[in-house]
Amino acid sequence: MLVAFSVAPSGGADGSDSVHDAVAAAVRIVRESGLPNHTDSMFTTIEGEWDEVFDVIKRATEAVGAFGSRVSLVLKADIRPGHTGELTGKVERLEQALDK
């Protein structure tokens, strides 16, 4: 499965609107997980089995929680049993279609 997620704190004590340190804490957990992943300006996408993906997302969310009194979490999942390599495979098929 692929899960794209965005996680950010709110209610921080310092009044700053920047969340890059909190997001970095989450992305660090994703990257250290060893699961295939990709981060862009809006989401981090991670690929793996249900339990391992959601374990990583839970730990990333908990890390962000240290930066504020509330956490916002947005998820989008593509659940396709029996398929792997879709983190890059979907994009490769799109590029091939664009080249036609």
Image (tube, grey):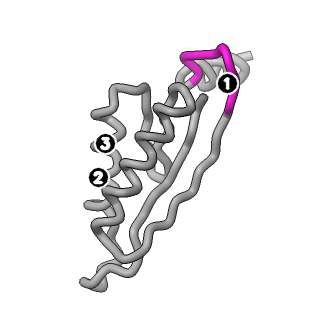
Query: Could you give the CA–CA distance between mark 2 and mark 1, rounded to whole angstroms?
Result: 29 Å
Q: Which residue is mark 1?
A: 94
Query: Could you give the CA–CA distance between mark 1 and mark 3, rounded to whole angstroms?
Result: 29 Å
> From the viewer's perspective, is the residue at label 2 or at label 1 nearer?
2
Nearest to N terminus: mark 2 or mark 1: 2
Q: Are marks 3 and 2 in contact (CB under 8 Å)?
A: no
Image point (34%, 60%), residue name: 64
Q: Are marks 1 and 3 in contact (CB under 8 Å)?
A: no
Given residues 64 and 86, the one toward you in this image is 64
Q: Which residue is mark 2?
A: 24
Q: Is residue 32 left or right of residue 93?
A: left
Instruction: Give percent across and percent down for residue 82.
Output: 66, 14
Q: Which residue is mark 3?
A: 29
Q: Quadrant of the N terminus?
A: top right
Q: Secondary structure at mark 2?
A: helix
Q: Is residue 83 highlighted in magenta?
A: yes
Instruction: Give percent across and percent down for residue 61.
Output: 41, 55
Query: Could you give the CA–CA distance between mark 3 and mark 2, rounded to whole angstroms?
Result: 9 Å
10 Å neighbourhood of mark 1: few (<14), some, or many (≥20)?
A: few
